Structures are given as structure tokens and as C-alpha cells.
Image: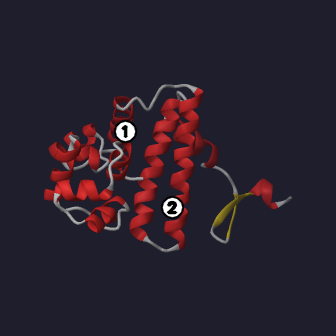
Amino acid sequence: MNRLRILRKNRRLTLKEVAYTVGIAENTLQKYETEKREPKKETWVKLADYYDVPVSYLMGLPDGLVQHINKTQAMTFEELHEAIIQWANDRNMIKQDRLTGLAQLAKVTEELGEISAGVNKNDKEKIEDSLGDILVTLIILAQDLNFDLLDCLNSAYNVIKDRKGKTINGVFVKETDLHK
């Protein structure tokens, strides 16, 4: 669910109330909330003012990411990784306990469902968004469980780099599983 809708629901406001106050059509606001339409820059500002939050928050961008993009226009994977962890820490999402780990695991699963829908519909925009969201949720989950996702990735690569097997219908099957 996008942040426009989350904020509106958390404040127990109707689409009609928000749309009227901000000066946009109710059905337009609904399209923004369902991500069927992207607000113009001026509308992002009006909505951010209405909810008293930064535009970057409404757009789902980590504050550190926004600041860095403004300076360099690009980030390395490691910089993004750190910005995402900082963003999650700023929002008290990482507590390194079982309950928050379970909540974040549910978020990873939700994003996997979204990429499945994107692939099934051949929706390139949805696939790209979902891949990014999956990475964000995995980085936060790993941090919450006290793992470094980059270390996990390195370990996984070291396991698979010399693995032998065969690709069948686009899926790699380990050699040991071919003989079962």
C-alpha cells in the first residue's frame, strides 16, 4: 500500500475529504493511491503539505537516498544498502527481535506476490518496482535478523560459483539433483 493511502487511512480521512482540501478530484486521488497515476510535482508538494510530511517520504524515498541523489545523481549498491538501513532505522523498523523479523518476512512475501503478478502480466514497470521493493525488504529483514545481506550474498556466491549442473527450461538444476 502506498504512503498516500497509509497516511489517509491512519488519520481516518476519506478520499473526499483529502481531495477537497488539497483541491484535486476524488477519483484522481484514488488513482494516486492505487498507483495507476503519478502526481505532478506541484501535487506531491500539496499532498506533503497537507499531511505535514516531506515529499520524499510520500514518494517512498529514503531521506539519505534523496540527499545523496541530489549531490551525485547515482549511488553504488553499497551506498543504497546503507541508505536503506538508515531509512529503516529512522522509522524504528529494525529492532532485531522475532516479531519485527516476522513482520518484515511477511513484507518480503508480499513483494514476491507483486513481482509474480508483474511477470504474469509482462508489466515491465511493475517488475522493476517489485525487484527494487524485494531488495529493500530483504536488506531490512537481514538487518533485523542481525545479518549483513552483502555477506549473505557473498556466501551464496561462493557456494554456487563452481557448482555443476544443467539448465532445464530456464532453471539451473544441480548435478546432484539430476541423478535422483
Residues packed near mark 1 inside 10 Å, few (<14), some (14 to 19) or many (20 plus): many
Query: Which disc is residue 84 wearing?
Result: 1
Q: In this view, does 2 lie to the left or right of 103?
A: left
| Residue 102, percent from left and from top | 59, 36
User: Of helix, strand and loop, which one carries label 2?
Assistant: helix
**Outermost residue to the left:** 42
User: Of helix, strand and loop, which one carries label 1?
Assistant: helix
CB within 8 Å, label 2 to label 1 = no
Query: Which disc is residue 115 wearing?
Result: 2
Residue 114 visible? The answer is yes
Query: Given the image, on which type of amino acid does mark 1 rest?
Result: Ile
Residue at image point 24% right, 46% down: 56
| Residue 81, percent from left and from top | 38, 39
- Measure the alpha-carbon separation of dots 2 and 1: 20 Å
Q: Quadrant of residue 78?
A: top left
Q: Is residue 110 left or right of residue 67?
A: right
Q: Quadrant of residue 70?
A: top left
Residue at image point 52% right, 46% down: 107
The quarter of the image holding the C terminus is bottom right
Residue at image point 31% right, 51% down: 4
Looking at the picture, tell me which residue is in the foreground, 48 or 11: 11
Query: Given the image, on which type of amino acid does mark 2 rest?
Result: Ile
Residues packed near mark 2 inside 10 Å, few (<14), some (14 to 19) or many (20 plus): many
